[in-house]
Image (cartoon, rainbow, N blue to C red):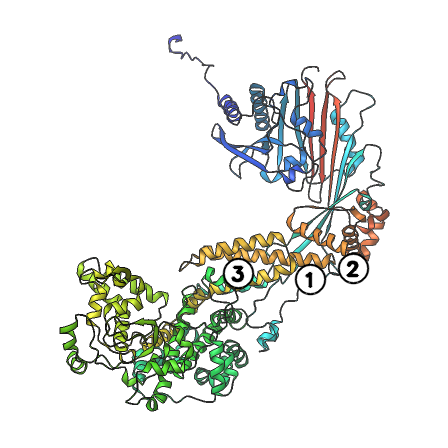
Amino acid sequence: QPESEVFEITDFTTASEWERFISKVEEVLNDWKLIGISSGKPLEKGVYTTGVWEEKSDEISFADFKFSITHHYLVQEPSDKDGKEELVEDALTLPMQDLLCMNNDFPPRAHCLVRWYGLREFVVIAPAANNDAVLSESKCNLLLSSISIALGNTGCQVPLFVQIHHKWRRMYVGECQGPGVRTDFEMVHLRKVPNHYTHLSGLLDIFKTKIGCPLTPLPPVSMAIRLTYVLQDWQQYFWPQQPPDIDALVGGEVGGLEFGKLPFGACEDPISELHLATTWPHLTEGIIVDNDVYSDLDPLQAPQWSVRVRKADNPQCLLGDFLTEFFKLCRRKESTDEILGRSAFEEEGKEVADITHALSKLTEPAPVPIHKLSVTNMVHSAKKKIRKHRGVDESPLNNEVLNTILLFLFPDAAEKLADGFESRASTSAGHNPPPENEDYNLFSQFKSAPSDSLTYKLALCLCMINFYHGGVKGVAHLWQEFVLEMRYRWENNYLIPGLANGPPDLRCCLLHQKLQMLNCCIERKKARDQGKRGSVSDRSPGDTGKGADHSADNPDKEKEVGKSWDSWSDSEEEFFECLSDTEDLKGNGQENGKKGGGNKEPVNLKPEGRLHPHGKLMLLHPGEPLYIPITQEPAPMTEDLLEEQSEVLAKLGTSAEGAHLRARMQSACLLSDMESFKAANPGCCLEDFVRWYSPRDYIEEEVVDEKGNVVIRGELSARMKIPSNMWVEAWETAKPVPARRQKRLFDDTREAEKVLHYLAVQKPADLARHLLPCIIHAAVLKVKEEEALEDISSVKKIIKQIISHSSKVLRFPNPEDKKLEEIIAQIMSVEAIIARARSLKAKFGVEKCENEEEKEDLQRFVNCLLEQPEVSVIGAGRGPAGSIIHKLFVSAQRVQRQAAPPLDEELRRPGSSEERRANTGAASDFPPPTGREVILRTSVPRPAPYSKLLPQRMYSVLTKEDFRLAGAFSADTTFF
């Protein structure tokens, strides 16, 4: 039934997948403006290494198979002449000029196609997924025809490559078109090399056959040859750094590594290989013989030598290990008690953890100071208790190490007598002015601690113990000892050495602030206890106020504006709460004052607690000199207390009542100073107080009185006159009470117990977090110190980066682990660079060199090796560096020959050409080359004798693993 036959129409106007693919390639080339004549200057020497390479990528697909298309190009200055109209008609396209250019053969760092073909710009189409590959020949041909059509349609003169086979093989085929010419890029990649291609004569044969030039005397072929030799065995140069003797350390001799110093340097040679490339850049065919029997290519005669070093991957370095191990502590979860075993510290634990027990000590009589203080007293009960619960050997740190560390942390403990100790403690408590250099002040950027402080030393000791003496257990043990030492010093009034005087320094880490806080408490308690002993004789009824005494005792205190620790030199019993109002009023006759003089104080009181007169100022009303009172110091605060306080104040809210409460809380110090002022200056008024306390709020102006005289009249500023403001309120409630009889603003006993409790509950992980800034600070200083000896410019830059990076990260509480790891990695990379510099210096004998000029050259050479991918050797094999390299190879060869005589015998028998040729001439100084690279170039008319003269090029590389030929062959498409 002819009716039922289906009539099909094939519409040939719809595009096939193949055509779509071609149009996509054309679209991308158009977008990237790669159409038309490419212009550019001839390339200068070495520009492929020093210049900047950039790439642009896009994705295209052939049906559902995805390809990435990438444009690689050398960034160049735009050419000066825009009017490039006067192009020579027969001029070669840029890629063809690049094929013949000899200035950039064998670039040390470049894309493989740049090395093989010498191109400055090209486009690669490769399968997008890493595991995809174009394997079948028909697919390869389809891709090649696609790019050929795309180039023809667009008139693009940039070479276009397609990657075929598996990615690791780096196989490319490609094409480049110009006006009337075409270049084909072809490649051969083999695992095993055919015997006749191992030398120059064989390669020349294949090149000439491939060109198939019809001319009889063939134009000469120019050649560039490079042989690479690898030195792996630095026989006579041992690695210059001896790792520290760990056995000696564990055995208890701490001399191996000083406490308080971080170690530095690599434990293994950070330079693994030296690659010497000997190059003959311009040879013409026939000048040199290199065949399977004999070779003229003697590395010592090569006109150019260049060297690169292969660095060991992540060499093990001491400072890096110390930092990473210490950083690992931050991730531990256990508490000190869990690590050391709860039972070991049961009694101690109770004492530390139970604050109520500690506070009950206040009511006990003051302890009698111990006059004999020595290390053995200081390494106290904890040791005995550990021993009681387990064997002597079980305690994580042995006695000798522990004693050495405690002596290092507390040098004052070596003093036997208490009075000797007293003077030592005061000097070590930080009277030394900080050196004004940037290294010293790094602590404020890193929020660590000054490099001469106890906190900084403690961090270094814990880092050392963590690495060498029992890890986290050792850390927990030393910390336990440290906390006990702090308590011992608090109870016996011994100042902590290595901390600056004064309130906690908020630029330092919290742990340092806590220790400073404890020192403040000890100082106040000490002053109080001394006062208790001496005050009985001081107190006589006719005393004209304590101030007189103080200023006589303490001439240096005169300089301070009425603040003094010694306000506490009175007995503890006198720290009573303020008297009840009625008692106070009875004694002060303040009622009369209140009625008559507004806010003036009655004059008939006895002045108390004076420090010294305030210049020539007089009280406004009684006209007596204005005295600066002895006042209470404001309570020192650590940053966590300040935060707590600001949170409490913020929680009070914005209501009127909240604001009033907040003002009351904040004015405790003001009230105390007002009371002291009233006690020192009977009959004073608020204006007097303001003139001393806040001179800006007392405005004086000249006015003319009734008699016509010019007089100075003063009044309070506008903010002081606001009705019921805080100052007026406080002044009205303040009673004339000298500082020594006021309620304490700063309860040192309570604060000290809080600090001691805080220290006792720190886990090793918390401790490591607190002290990590100190360790990073120490590591940066160490790296700076080591770099100063080597003077490597690139390292200086990296150190600056580390400092700015660290100061950003460490300034905030709880920095992220990832950021801390980055900082540690940066420090490790600097350590590795310095270790490499030292290794190379030792190998090239820089220090042993007598001739100053040669020494400088060698030093420069070593520095270049570190920073550049490849360094050319001045004077090739005859220069100072060249002769050293030659000696290195000779000695390595000698060692090899001694080690393997039977192998040597084998080489003497006729074997492969490579082996036979290795034994001729001076080549025996060097091992057989690891890599042989040859570039052959010529210009011939192709395919016919009357075609245009076009460039032909072939690159060959031969290594142990593989053999590759990469050819670029041009043909005339007009005359063929």
> Which amino acid type is shown beneath numbered disc 2?
Glu
Front-most of residues 282 and 410 = 410
Residue 328 percent location from the top left of the image: 48, 63
Q: Quadrant of the C terminus?
A: top right
Spatial distance from mark 1 to mark 3, Cα to Cα?
Answer: 34 Å
Residue 413 percent location from the top left of the image: 50, 82
The image quarter in which residue 900 lies: bottom right
Q: Residues within 10 Å of mark 1 (few under 14, many from 20)?
A: some
Residue 693 percent location from the top left of the image: 30, 67
Q: Residues within 10 Å of mark 2 (few under 14, many from 20)?
A: few
Considering only order in the chain, which callout, 2 or 3, is on the residue closer to the N terminus? Answer: 3
State which mark lies toward you, 3 or 2: 3
* Residue lying farthest to the top in this orientation: 2
Front-most of residues 709 and 208 = 709
Residue 188 visible at all: no
Q: State yes or no: discs 3 and 2 in contact (Cβ < 8 Å).
A: no
Q: State yes or no: discs 1 and 3 in contact (Cβ < 8 Å).
A: no
Q: Please, is residue 723 above or below residue 962 in the view?
A: below
Q: State yes or no: discs 2 and 1 in contact (Cβ < 8 Å).
A: no
State which mark lies toward you, 1 or 3: 3
Image check: 911 left or right of 319? Answer: right
> Which amino acid type is shown beneath numbered disc 1?
Trp
**Residue matched to label 2:** 850
Image check: 464 left or right of 650? Answer: right
> Which amino acid type is shown beneath numbered disc 3?
Glu
**Residue matched to label 1:** 239
Spatial distance from mark 2 to mark 1, Cα to Cα?
Answer: 22 Å
Residue at image point 35% right, 68% down: 637
State which mark lies toward you, 2 or 1: 2
Image check: 148 left or right of 593? Answer: right
Residue 573 visible at all: yes
**Residue matched to label 3:** 438
